[in-house]
Image (spheres, rainbow, N blue to C red):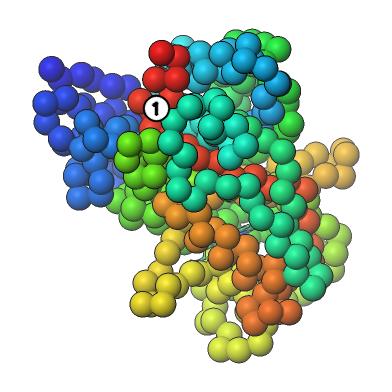
């Protein structure tokens, strides 16, 4: 039987008797066979590799105690694909997608399924000057669209369904700022892998029974824009590792203070580089004086993002932390696992 599955901006035509699944990507139609995918053994990924959108809502929820709450959450998660269709049909060109992540604390009781190997809470990394924070959060909804109203509508319908089963821990609305710049004024997202490289950076088979999934880390950063603005442009460029106006990469420092770009580039002992898929968004309000960057990274291996954070917060060499942190403070930090669409759907059984 061949089914046509509408999945966010992508359409996957899957023949259940055949292990091939076709995915659209910024670089066109690609076969993911080379990646991982046999439909029967690994399932459909959520739209982790969706293109950058104009708007996003980052919704982090905590489950209320008790079996009743878990039942409601399971049934809502199993219907998330339907809810997505309800909203995305209003404008098929709006690139609407929602990715669901399940947190470490609730994974076992909510799913009653084997736990992804690396899923654990975000560690608190204490450097000489700066530290990560590890904050509560059982569920992540990364809601993306070029239309703010569709993100709003999805969030409304979703929270209606979840009702009393959850508490909102944080809801942050992000917007695309000029030519994909963060509020520090730099183009953010350039080195992101695209197409097949994005899938291999983000997807693993750590889900139940070897199903496809991705680790997700989020951190909400608040900027000190006055302090940042007091630096000369050349100093800012040295901190980031790129030029501000035309976004050109600067050479890596051989020793001493490294740039953000260098500290977040991870190589293993064999010299292989391990990338992640980021979809950072600016957020804030001039009226309330709040300016920030919402960091979100999808990764095949959780250790890759943890290694980036170690190099940023503790420093490489230790003591030489990422100077972006002198002007950016994380106020949240969570780890989630985004399972396959089938795992989510199956929670309602
Ligand atoms: C205040 C928060 C942050 C801001 C404003 C920020 C901004 C940027 C900018 C402007 C770039 C250069 C352009 C690009 O390639 O995207 C960059 C690169 C990068 N950032 Fe961040 N970032 C933040 C936090 C993080 C965190 C927490 C991580 C990972 C844990 C991270 C991982 C990366 C990676 C992997 C690159 C690409 C490096 C390369 O291969 O060139 N960033 N970031």
Q: Work out whether 7 lies above or below 243.
A: above
Q: Residue at x 52, y 46 (%)?
A: 119
Question: From the viewer's perspective, is 158 left or right of 199?
Answer: right
Residue 238, position as x, y percentages in the image: 66, 77
- Residue located beneath label 1 in the image: 343
Residue 70, position as x, y percentages in the image: 59, 18
Residue 74, position as x, y percentages in the image: 52, 18
Local SS, label 1: helix
Disc 1 crowd rating (10 Å Cα; few below 14, some 14-19, many 20+) is: many
Question: From the viewer's perspective, is 209 left or right of 168?
Answer: left
Q: Residue at x 66, y 55 (%)?
A: 123
Q: Quadrant of residue 1?
A: top left
The answer, for residue 9, to whether it is visible in the render is no
Q: How many marks?
A: 1
Q: Work out whether 202 lies above or below 227.
A: above
Q: Residue at x 41, y 13 (%)?
A: 349
Quarter of the image where ligand 1 sits: bottom right
């Amino acid at each position: 039987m061949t089914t046509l599955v509408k999945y966010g901006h992508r359409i996957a035509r899957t023949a259940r008797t055949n292990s091939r699944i076709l995915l659209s990507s910024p670089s066109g139609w690609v076969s993911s066979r080379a990646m991982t995918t046999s439909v029967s053994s690994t399932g459909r990924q959520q739209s982790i590799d969706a293109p950058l959108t104009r708007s996003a809502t980052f919704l982090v929820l905590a489950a209320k105690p008790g079996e009743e709450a878990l039942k409601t959450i399971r049934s809502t998660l199993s219907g998330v694909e339907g809810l997505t269709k309800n909203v995305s049909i209003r404008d098929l060109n709006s690139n609407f997608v929602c990715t669901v992540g399940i947190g470490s604390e609730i994974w076992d009781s909510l799913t009653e399924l084997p736990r992804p190997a690396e899923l654990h809470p975000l560690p608190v990394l204490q450097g000489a000057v700066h530290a990560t924070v590890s904050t509560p959060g059982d569920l992540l909804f990364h809601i993306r669209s070029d239309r703010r109203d569709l993100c709003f509508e999805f969030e409304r319908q979703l929270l209606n369904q979840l009702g009393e089963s959850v508490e909102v821990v944080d809801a942050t609305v992000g917007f695309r700022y000029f030519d994909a710049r963060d509020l520090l004024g730099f183009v953010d997202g350039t080195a992101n892998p695209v197409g097949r490289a994005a899938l291999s950076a983000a997807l693993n088979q750590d889900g139940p029974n070897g199903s496809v999934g991705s680790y997700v880390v989020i951190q909400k950063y608040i900027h000190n824009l006055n302090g940042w603005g007091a630096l000369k442009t050349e100093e800012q460029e040295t901190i980031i590792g790129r030029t501000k106006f035309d976004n050109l990469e600067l050479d890596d420092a051989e020793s001493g203070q490294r740039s953000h770009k260098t500290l977040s580039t991870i190589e293993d002992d064999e010299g292989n580089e391990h990338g992640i898929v980021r979809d950072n968004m600016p957020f804030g309000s001039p009226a309330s004086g709040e300016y920030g960057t919402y960091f979100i990274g999808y990764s095949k291996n959780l250790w890759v993002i943890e290694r980036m954070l170690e190099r940023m917060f503790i420093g490489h060499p230790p003591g030489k932390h990422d100077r972006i942190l002198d002007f950016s403070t994380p106020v949240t930090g969570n780890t989630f696992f985004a399972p396959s669409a089938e795992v989510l759907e199956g929670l309602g059984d």
